[in-house]
Image: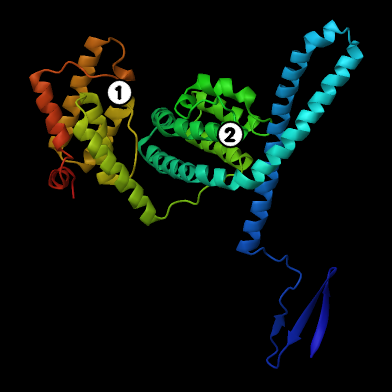
Amino acid sequence: PEEEEVKGKKKEKVFRGTGGREKKAPATNKKKELTAKEKERAAELARQASGTKAAKGAAEMKAEHVATEMAAALGPLMKELEVPEALQEAIRRHLRHSAQSVFEKAAHSVFASGHKAKIAAVQEPFATSYNQILLYSKAATQFGPTPPELLVLERHLIKKTCVPLAALLFHAAAQEMALGDSPTEAQLATPEARTALLPRLPPALRPALTDLHQTLAASKKGVSDLLAVIDTVVTTMCLQVPVALDKNKERQVVFAHRQAWLEQLGASTDAGVVLLLVLQLLIVATHKALLHVPWRAAESIIEQLAPHVSADVVGMLRRLHGRVNELRAATEPGLAREMSTGAGELPLEEGDVALMQQVRDIVSTKEALAAAVKK
């Protein structure tokens, strides 16, 4: 038999079986969860709405610019004809309204036809850079045992990988505006170019990209702060935050970086660059992790690698590090701690060249690397 029991204000149906046990009927008033397809459709509608808003903002800016130019061109004529000020203002308003109407129609047409293609063109390089930042950030946390050391690694990471990603986003925003004289991605890696571009961007994008620009410049901001700002920019620009890499894809990314660093190591004749590349390759071999090593952190990284590599390897790394610091201090006093990749080659003696080659040989072959790394 079926009975009803009242508990407070909620009624529940209870089914009594022959064994005296009670079973509650499953609740039927739960909110239905959206399917993956419905979620994707909702996200697409949200992106379209955001993109339309951005296009409208861009149209308003262009209309204002064109109307101002037309009014300036008509100014001398209206002055010569002694047109009253009230009529001049009415003409300017009409020009602004007409230009805005034309640009809004054009912007809507362009957005509807080409927006998806533009987003797709930006999404892939953005996802690649974003996932690389996550991998580097994980290694930086591992090799930054103290907050000051972690900040050194993260600021170097921001310089090497986050700045190019920001340049990509700024360039995509400029392309969305179809600015004919917009700077290139390489130029937007500099703060001066980004500062000059910001006032020309649509109001819908300007606040998020301004936050990104200021976070890049802040000396005490870490990668987590920057990623939070990037997530906001991505939402504003109708991009998607990429899904985290699985283990298989992560191994592929690590392998590709290892091959690129080996090629760079073979071509470099700068002792400082050689040492940094060898440290990065040893981190890949011992921890299966990616990390851009700044010169200021090189000594700390050597000590952290010491338990994982042979004593002879540690000795060579320490000697080359010390020798480069000596040469750097003698060549440019006070700059030894600031040295980074691309700082310029140092005048090496014959013994220094031999030591640099020994350090290079540590990772040059699989056999040498296997001998260097402890089992």
**Quadrant of the snapshot with the N terminus:** bottom right
Residue farthest to the bottom, as pictured: 18
Q: Position of residue 359 (x, y in %)?
A: 16, 32
Looking at the picture, which amino acid does disc 1 mark? Gly
Q: Position of residue 142 (x, y in %)?
A: 37, 40
Looking at the picture, which amino acid does disc 2 mark? Ala
Q: Give the mark nearer the N terminus: 1 vs 2.
A: 2
Q: Nearer the viewer, residue 47 or 329?
A: 47
Q: Is residue 369 left or right of residue 145?
A: left
Among the 4 quarters of the image, the one containing residue 73: top right
Q: Residue at x 73, y 73 (%)?
A: 27
Residue under circle 2?
A: 173
Q: Residue at x 67, y 55 (%)?
A: 42
Q: Is residue 63 left or right of residue 86?
A: left
Q: Is residue 201 above or below residue 127?
A: above
Distance between the alpha carbons at the discs numbered 1 and 2: 30 Å
Q: Residue at x 30, y 47 (%)?
A: 255
Q: Nearer the viewer, residue 44 or 151?
A: 44
Mark 2: secondary structure: helix
Among the 4 quarters of the image, the one containing residue 317: top left
- Mark yes or no: residue 288 visible: no
Residue under circle 1?
A: 342
Q: Residue at x 28, y 17 (%)?
A: 336
